[in-house]
Image (tube, rainbow, N blue to C red):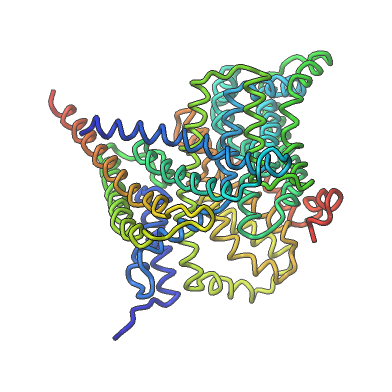
Amino acid sequence: MMSASLTPGVAAIVLFGSFFVLLVLRVPVAVSLALACLPVLLFEDRLSPMVLFNEMFKAYNSFILLAVPFFLLTANLMNVGGITDRLVTLSRTMVGNFPGSLAQINVLLSVFFAGISGSSTADAASQGKIFIEAQVKEGYDLSFSIAITAVSAVLAVIIPPSILMVVWGGVLSVSIGALYLAGVIPGLLIGGAQMLTVHVYAKIRKYPTYRRATLREFIAAAAISVPALMTPFIIVGGILLGWFTPTESAAVAVCYAAALSLLFYREMSSRQLRDALLDTGKLAGVALFCVGTASVFGWLLAYYQIPRALLANVQSWGLGLVGVGFFVAFVFLVVGCFLDAIPAIIIVGTTLQPLTEAVHMHPVSFAIIGIVGLAFGLVTPPYGLCLMISCAIAKVRLRYALKDTMIMLVPMLLVLAMLIIWPDIALILPKIVSPEFLK
Amino acid sequence: MSKLIDAWYRLLNALIVVTVVILIIPVMLQILSRFTGLIPRYIWTEEMARFFFIWMVMLGAMVAVRDGTHFDVDVWPELKPRANAILRLVSSLFMLLTAIVFLWWGAQFTSFGWNQTSEIADLPMWLIFIAWPLLGATWLLFIWQGWVRDVQALRQEQAP
């Protein structure tokens, strides 16, 4: 009997070919990934479509991914519970006297938000509602307002806590505590680059400036925000001290945000609480369903050893440490245009790992380059979730804000290049605080 | 029929809220039992959290078809309404195919695992596996309802 089995080349063409055709036909990404696997699963003798469910089950049956709904819930609770409002006030007293005040507040709030929430999509959704309309009212251009909201939202996955770091650490076995520490300085640098961009825009386009806040106002705003700003220290500190696992720390963050909202700020109604829970479940379901089907896709790629075939070429180029760094960043930036970040880590992260090991790149350094690259992918078309969300809130098509987004990406890409050339920018903090995590 | 589907949709939404709330409990129990002697150190908490998590994901993926919130990629320039409608139909046919795959092989998957039990708490595994065929069936219902709505909208446009 003839046994039907595909060569890796044919399998690769079928998998990638049908995936892209389905994407173009506007079939949802998660469904495209599943359907692209189907012909291979049917045709290959040793496989059956039941692999689809088995691999999905294995992907979901992990304690690590559980952190995703928790991070989303924390962000949702912050918004309905009045925590976000307090942080807006605090940001205003800090950067209100800079040119383009409201846009600067937008960026600074993203930095604070990033320290509490680990989800960029949640950041884009909540700040889009707060800032886009308000900025346009003050005379900012709509496309600028959409773009700055979207690009500042990517900070949420770079500054700890971060969904992407939890997933990366789980999939590629890197210490999540070390990743969290390594993300702090790159995140602040990117935030700084964005504030600089806003400054230049504001000078050229003459955007409005608020009056300087008094020291008393700042102290009052800071005092009321202190409990909220404690969150990142509880999460990161708790992990570093070995009190709880990253997943557990996300659950602790949920309970802390709920306690602050219910007991301290007291603005949340039971209706809002229910909506926050429902939104969390829905968004987590959509995002993670895609993780499941992407895992099947990635499993099939590994089954046919396609990644090895793809990388054989690259390895012969003889790239050095920095060269591999730029190659990794380039691959993640391109993949990020078409794929959500979590499936990209599962499929591409595991593929590139041997390449980085060959040039002795530090696993944490690899992770930071990959995560920053993927974070930028959140605002690059055609599939940039943060930009999509911001545009959806402003009720315009994605193209509308594209030019300003690309301009804002340039300084951010320079920061990424710095991280590749000087890996110590990211590694210095974990080296000082907890060298044992770096092994 | 449409009312029944609406009721099913509301039930799924309520279940999502329940699963999200329940998810937090075993994880917090785990931490509490580690740091206080108040409650024994359960080991089933971790497994229970994972199982509710799987159900939350699958329920979320079910209702997303009706909400139309599964993320897609838009590479087309501004299209005419007619071209848009055709694209929508093509994409929903592929969704339909996926729903059938999940229902058909998902049912086999469930029946294969019928006698398995979980590693820790000895729960019957079909309680988890059944989520996949159920997702297929639910998608069929929601896709069908979407089509009925589209046809009605078309008729109303043509009528006056």
Q: Residue at x 45, y 75 (%)?
A: A8
Examine the rendering and report whether any part of residue A327 can be seen. yes
Residue at 70% across / 68% down in the picture?
Answer: A357
Total count of labels: 0
Q: Residue furthest left?
A: B159
Q: Position of residue A263 (x, y in %)?
A: 66, 20
Q: Is residue B21 left or right of residue A159?
A: left
**Residue at far bottom of view:** A1
- Is A237 located above or below residue A59 in the figure? above
Q: Residue at x 53, y 47 (%)?
A: B48
The picture places residue A85, in percent across and down from the top left corner, at 64, 21
Asked whether residue A408 is in view, the answer is no
- Vertical relation: A57 (above or below) A376: below
The residue shown at (72%, 51%) is A179
The quadrant of the rendering that contains the C terminus of chain A is bottom right
When asked about the image quadrant of residue A234, the answer is top right
Where residue B60 sits in the image (x, y, percent)?
A: 43, 41
Q: Pinpoint residue A387: horizontal percent, then vertical percent.
A: 53, 38
For the N terminus of chain A, which image quadrant?
bottom left
Quick one: A307 or A201, which is closer to the camera?
A307
Q: Relative to A29, does residue B17 appear above or below in the rendering?
A: above
State left or right for residue B44 relative to residue A173.
left
